[in-house]
């Protein structure tokens, strides 16, 4: 694979600059802005993972997408746009989707200096990634395995047919080889692990595999029970905290770890939870991302045109691109009671409040708007 060269003089993505993080607009402009749009470009996928956040929506055949010109016209209306994410299903499974939707979106983003991310399971032949990857900033993959046996069990958990181990092993090896080859060629590969009852004891090992594949970043999020994962066991706060600390103690310091949707806050009642917040903000090469869902991002389904505000909470579509401007939908969301309830802000602790689902899971009796940080991460 040929080396992917740097395309523009935009500020590189580093622990000091994560363009998806809503922190920057909230802290610099005093309000949230629509800086991020995510497109669900397909509901087809070759896998059926146990934790899939859109599992119930996956289909065997899908309809006709909205022409990309229409999608781009909608993006043209958003002056504040900073990032575009492309997700599925598996976005690159259907070459037509790549040609007619993904490539034009990436080219458009490049022309506006907008950062891009695509979520892929990376199990297709390497050649399928080669002719568009130069226009992409972040290739996001999932990694929740000790090896091919785990992969076999996890990624076909909801498959209607039995999938032979040999098939799973081939896909697992291909994913690992692809991640290595793309990383070597200069692609920013970010591998995400979910903290689940299964992964929790093995996260340091998974982290080592991710480092060995050459990934720039390891994204770590607790698993929350939505969609396919709705019957999975929820870890306690103690278990989550211990797992995170264990990983931090054993990590490769050269790999950036990005934690997201954490259930620990600077206003947490327990000192050990506040201590964790402090530690994560002091360690080099570790960041805690504020949740884009509900703060700076909208998701567009390219088949229905529905606009949703988050893929975690049970908030129904807030509009449709056939009838609404994205900016109007976003402003409507900001005054929605669910948003108002969770949009607290403690600047000296660098906190913008909880993800909706996290708040519902662990803190259903808390009024976040009445709480206050009991620590500061600002250096004086
Ligand atoms: S912003 Fe909200 S969640 Fe964060 S410390 Fe303040 S009150 Fe707590």
Image (spheres, rainbow, N blue to C red):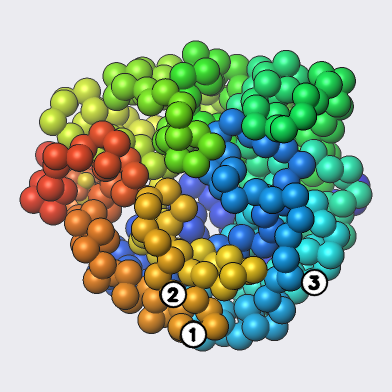
Residue reaching furthest front?
A: 160
For the residue pair 259 and 378, the one nearer the viewer reads as: 259
Q: Residue furthest top?
A: 201
Structural crowding at the residue carrying mark 3, measured as other residues with C-alpha within 10 Å and reported as few (<14), some (14–19) or many (≥20): some
Report if the beta carbon of the residue with label 2 is closer than 8 angstroms to ligand 1: no
**Any mark on residue 323, and which?**
1
Front disc: 3 or 2: 2
Label placed on residue 100:
3
Circle 3/circle 1 CB separation < 8 Å: no
Q: Which residue is mark 2?
A: 319
Q: CA distance from mark 2 to mark 1?
A: 7 Å
User: In the structure shown, which secondary structural element does the residue marked by tag 2 occupy?
Assistant: strand
> On the picture, is 234 further left or further right than 40?
left
Kindly tell me whether residue 3 is visible in this rendering. Answer: yes
Instruction: Specify whether residue 248 is in view.
Output: no
Pick the front one: 55 or 92: 55
Is 374 displayed left or right of 250 in the figure?
Answer: left
Quadrant of residue 202 within the rendered picture: top right
Label 2–label 1 contact, CB within 8 A: yes
Q: Earlier in the sequence, mark 3 or mark 1?
A: 3
Quadrant position of residue 327: bottom left
Q: Residue at x 36, y 33 (%)?
A: 280
Where in the figure is residue 147, as x and y percent of width and height? 72, 18
Q: Is residue 58 above or below residue 255?
A: below
Q: Position of residue 229 (x, y in %)?
A: 50, 34
User: In the rendered view, would you say 166 is above or below 373?
Assistant: above
The residues bearing labels 3 and 1 have C-alpha atoms spaced at a distance of 23 Å
Task: Give the side of residue 236 with respect to residue 127, left or right.
Answer: left
């Amino acid at each position: 694979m040929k080396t992917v060269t740097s395309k523009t003089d935009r500020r590189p993505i580093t622990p000091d600059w994560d363009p998806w993080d809503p922190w920057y607009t909230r802290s610099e402009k005093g309000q949230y802005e629509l800086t991020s749009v995510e497109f669900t470009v397909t509901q087809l996928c070759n896998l059926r993972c146990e934790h899939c956040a859109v599992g119930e929506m996956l289909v065997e055949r899908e309809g006709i997408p909205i022409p990309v010109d229409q999608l781009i016209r909608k993006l043209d209306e958003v002056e504040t746009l900073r990032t575009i994410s492309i997700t599925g299903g598996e976005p690159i499974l259907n070459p037509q989707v790549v040609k007619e939707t993904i490539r034009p979106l990436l080219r458009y983003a490049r022309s506006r200096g907008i950062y891009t991310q695509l979520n892929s399971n990376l199990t297709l032949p390497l050649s399928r990634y080669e002719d568009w990857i130069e226009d992409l900033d972040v290739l996001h993959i999932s990694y929740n395995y000790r090896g091919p046996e785990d992969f076999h069990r996890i990624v076909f958990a909801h498959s209607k047919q039995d999938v032979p181990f040999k098939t799973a092993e081939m896909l697992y090896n291909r994913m690992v080889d692809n991640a290595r080859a793309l990383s070597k060629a200069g692609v920013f590969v970010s591998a995400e692990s979910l903290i689940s009852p299964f992964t929790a004891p093995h996260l340091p090992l998974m982290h080592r595999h991710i480092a060995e594949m050459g990934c720039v970043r390891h994204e770590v999020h607790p698993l929350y029970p939505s969609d396919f994962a709705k019957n999975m066991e929820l870890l306690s706060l103690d278990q989550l905290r211990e797992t995170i600390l264990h990983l931090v103690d054993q990590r490769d310091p050269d790999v950036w770890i990005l934690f997201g949707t954490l259930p620990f806050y600077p206003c947490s009642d327990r000192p050990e939870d506040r201590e964790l917040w402090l530690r994560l903000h002091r360690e080099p090469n570790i960041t805690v991302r504020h949740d884009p869902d509900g703060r700076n991002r909208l998701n567009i389904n390219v088949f229905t045109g529905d606009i949703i505000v988050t893929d975690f909470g049970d908030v129904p579509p807030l509009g449709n691109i056939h009838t609404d401007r994205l900016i109007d939908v976003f402003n409507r969301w900001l005054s929605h009671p669910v948003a108002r309830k969770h949009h607290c802000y403690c600047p000296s602790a660098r906190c913008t409040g909880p993800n909706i689902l996290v708040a519902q899971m662990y803190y259903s009796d808390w009024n976040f708007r009445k709480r206050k940080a009991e620590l500061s991460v600002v250096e004086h």
